[in-house]
Amino acid sequence: MRKPKNKKFRFVSQKKVLVLFFLVLAAFIFLFARIVWLIKNNETEYQKQVLSQRSYDSKTLPARRGDIVDAKGVKLATCEKVYNMVVDASVMTTKDGKYIETTLSALQQCFPQLDVAEIRTFVKQNPSNQWHVVLKKLTYDQIYDFRVMQGENKDIKGIWFEEEFRRIYPGGSLAADVIGFTRSDNQGLYGLEEFYNKELNGVDGRTYGYLDDDLNLQKTVKPAVDGYTVHSTIDSNIQSIVERCLYDFNEAHKNHNHYGDGAENLGCIVMEVNTGNILAMASYPTFNLNDTKNTSALLGGVQVAQVDKENGYFEIKKTGKYIDQELLDSMTDDEILTNLNYLWKNYCIASSYEPGSTFKPFTVAAALETDSISPDSYYECLGSWQVGPHNIHCHNRYGDGVISLKSAVAQSCNVAMMKIATTMGAEKFSKFQQAFNFGLKTNVDLAGEARTADFLRSASEMDASDLATYSFGQNFNVTMIQLATGFCSLINGGYYYEPHMVSKITNSSGVTVKNIEPRILKQTISASTSELIREYCKAVVTEGTGKAARPAGYMIGGKTGTAQTYPRDGNDFVVSFVGFAPADDPQVLVYVVVDRVNEAKQDNVGYAREIVRNIFTEVLPYMNIFMTEELSAKEIKELEDRQLANTLKYGKALENPDETQSDDTPDMQEKDPAWKSFPKDPATGYLKDPNTGELLDPDTGDPINGTHSALDF
Amino acid sequence: MATESVVERTKENIQHHTDVSLWFALLFLLGFGMVMIYSASSYTAFAEHSDQMYYLKRQAIAVGLGLIAMLVVSRIPYHFWERFALLGLMLSTILILLVKTSLGVESHGARRWLKTGIPGFNLQPAEVAKVAIILFLSVMICKMGASIVKFKGFMLMMIPPAILFLLIWKVTDNLSSALIVMAIAVILVFVASPDYKKFVLLALLAIAGAVAIVLIVKYTNPQGSFRLSRIRVWLDPESDPDDKGFQTLQALYAIGSGGVWGKGLGQSMQKLSFLPESQNDMIFSIICEELGVFGAAAIMLMFVVLIWRMMIIANNAPDLFGGLLVTGVIAHIAVQAVLNIAVVTNTIPNTGISLPFISYGGSSVIFLLVEMGWVMSVARGIEYRN
């Protein structure tokens, strides 16, 4: 094209290029006008539109529910972080779906329980979905492999893990009734979980997105405040001793008289006499806190049914059947739930029963306190006593004869009690019942304490036979916690401590938020009356109905109780034993109730006595309470067997058991020191060392001669 | 803005034309484009590739390569390229056909790209076709001379672009690029021809056809066709806000919410994954959102300056071929810029056209800079005249 054919085509037409330029310019000007028009007409509306599309990322940060720990800091309830798996289809389907198969095969590999085909269908059908939860409550271990794969392979996309906390109970069924459990929404149900729900639950945090003055998206985080830790007074060692004793008892008696548990209910409270701290509280049958809905826990228990009443109320009634597998299978979900609810209740605080003779010391204390009787009183028992139209029997049909007040308690004489109560009168009797909180709630810090006011008549409503039967603990109902707490005040000098389960509340960093000190609510009786009651209760064990309850090496006080349940013509009994040790300076009280033991003859207080003795034998040495009595050869043998049995539970037997025994013996049997056998110096009454002639104190073995004493008098 | 040319006198007393305004406008658009790509893409780049600079880095490499190519081309006398006219046209045809083979790459639901062997960089044959058609028609017009005035000559002239148009449209399913190729061809013929009559007629015919289609869509509401539904959405974007109208509406929201002064550089909210292709076809709306009317005006002004300077070069080109070559480049840049902004402002139905020099896209910017190399080569050939 070096030589164009004519001049006209040697150069481009300048005019045409100029026209082109102006056309372009015109187009730009038009477009500019269009932009200005757009903004002028729609600015505010579109600004709102843009803002409304933003999702501000408001997200809840879950707070961790606080722990429940025992007196030694052992965790009874704690939280574990769990993860919910979320499938984000919109991310997975990006890049023309090249991530889908890689991600799904990784999922298949790490989570065999997952239906990958279903996820594939979901992702393909909802490619814009961002939140589809496929697996819930995975533990860290479960997701660990997948997280590693995710880190290594960038093609695994669109799987998130949402964090959550799950409540776990390391002890399983340990102290199940006391601790309670939580629903999936973190609300406590029963026990400490419910009573301290507010303290345990923290405050959920949030992340907020908001727009500042310059319309910049800002993000703030309001961190979650974790829940407080509740420090219980429960000692898990004592608790497990108690639970093991109850379990052993159940094993020994179950299916004896009929199919079912060893007793309808077994309950036990171990309480510190001088503080009101509850060291252990257990009942049987029990359940596993980590698996509360497991119906196998119902097996062997008595079946209950909900009976609706016309005014909208309902009543839980026993059907008289015992739950076996066949019955369980035939029960509807509602019926199962009714029975589970019954199981979850804490027998020690939620059920009431007639206390029986364990109430007698209260009658005696009230009479002594009101000067209605004197400690030197004597009563004649002829086996029964006529009260109005009723001829009320003593448990000893042939009569106890003429007995002292002390013996009346020790032998558990009904006639003596009726006479005492009648002397005192309904007014005073009722006043003292109330003083010991019978008919009132103890306000123990557990959810679900039963109301007993309706089971107790006031002085004005009482007739002579009421007063007579009340005196030996029949015709009115108490809860275990009422009786145990009241009994503590009988023997500790008259101080009624509020029973409690929690000693301290700390926040998540361990700072104490609240200290719960032992709280004396009232003085029920005088110290001198209390001393008499201790003496009488000791007599129960030394010469009365509670002899068999004394553990090796300790002197304890206590009181037996046998109460016939309704209907009176039946053969059902609640037997109980309340014991405290040491007898002269009570530190710890153990109260055991055996409700309708699975034996042909139920009215044998020995069942409860045996459990108390077993508990004392293990708990007292654990609590560092020194032995008060000398051990007989039989007792030494018993302790050694028990020690060996306990050792064998946790390990192998040593090859030479004799060696073990000889090793253990010095611990078990306190040998008398050499000075005990020194002859007594007749002039001074002190012991005399035959070698040195030194005089020694017969109790302590300290030399009396000032020159050898390290102490200044 | 300086618009005067600077004359440089070399030792050999040969005068070269170095256009400062042209350089300024070009570099401004390239630099500004990269800033906006970073602003518009950093969020999605981080979300998708864990690297905020993912798109910026790629664009910077393409711009670097393009600038080198441009400098090289500008030093080569433009007549050198004459001999490749037919070859280029055939090559681009083959490349378009290759899209249907296994070398083709599908993205955004259309198969328009070719693998280049360099990871992440795919070639769009339509870009090659645009360059090829400029070269081929410039050569052809020069060859045919006055015969293009005749109807037969005009029709002959339109055959190659028509073939290319059909290929790009039907093979790569890319109507917008096909239309751009056609527009370049018409503009070249328009500038070469002395008359106006048939072009006015053609323009009126095109407008009438477009109006007819729009009216048909509006009143008969036909179903099925993907393009016709776009026209319906164009008429009323809010009729389908979640699907087909989504991108258009989001672009409008961006422009509208930016206001006169904009939200400030980097402050766009629409880029936070609401506006699809925010670093690509829709980058102009992000510019409007962040920099307001003034940002939009600045960009448009730069395009006007660029085209103005190229017009001066075309008018002063040493020969018809040079002038046509520059005119072809003007046509390419102007048509794309105008159509892109028209799409973003919903002035015309939504179709995928990138904004020259600014939108993200490697092959586009490299070929545009090669074309700028031609323009500069033509400018170098302008003899200094008093």
Image (tube, coloured by chain):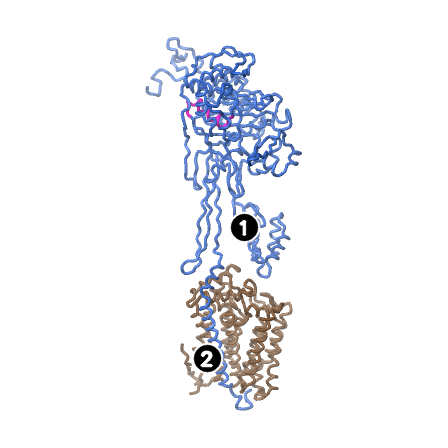
Chain colours: A blue, B brown
- SS at circle 1: strand
Relative depth, front residue between A536 and B265: A536
Q: Nearer the viewer, residue B351 or A349?
A: A349
Q: Residues in magenta?
A: A477-495
Q: Where, quadrant-wise, is the C terminus of chain A in this rendering?
A: top left
For label 1, the crowd category at 10 Å Cα-Cα, with few meaning under 14, some 14 to 19 and many 20 or more, is: some
Residue drawn 54% across the image and 35% down it: A171
Report the Cα–Cα distance between label 2 and label 1: 58 Å
Mark 2: amino acid: Arg
Residue A420 on image: x %, y %? 47, 16
- Determine whether A59 is above or below B11 in the image: above
> Residue A639 placed where, x, y %?
54, 22
Q: Are marks 2 and 1 in contact (CB under 8 Å)?
A: no
Reply above or below: B205 against A446. Answer: below
**Residue on which disc 1 sits:** A161
Q: Which chain contains the residue that carries disc 2?
A: B
Q: Secondary structure at mark 2?
A: helix
Residue furthest bottom as drawn? A6
Per the image, the residue denoted by label 2 is B309
Determine whether A647 is above or below B378 in the image: above
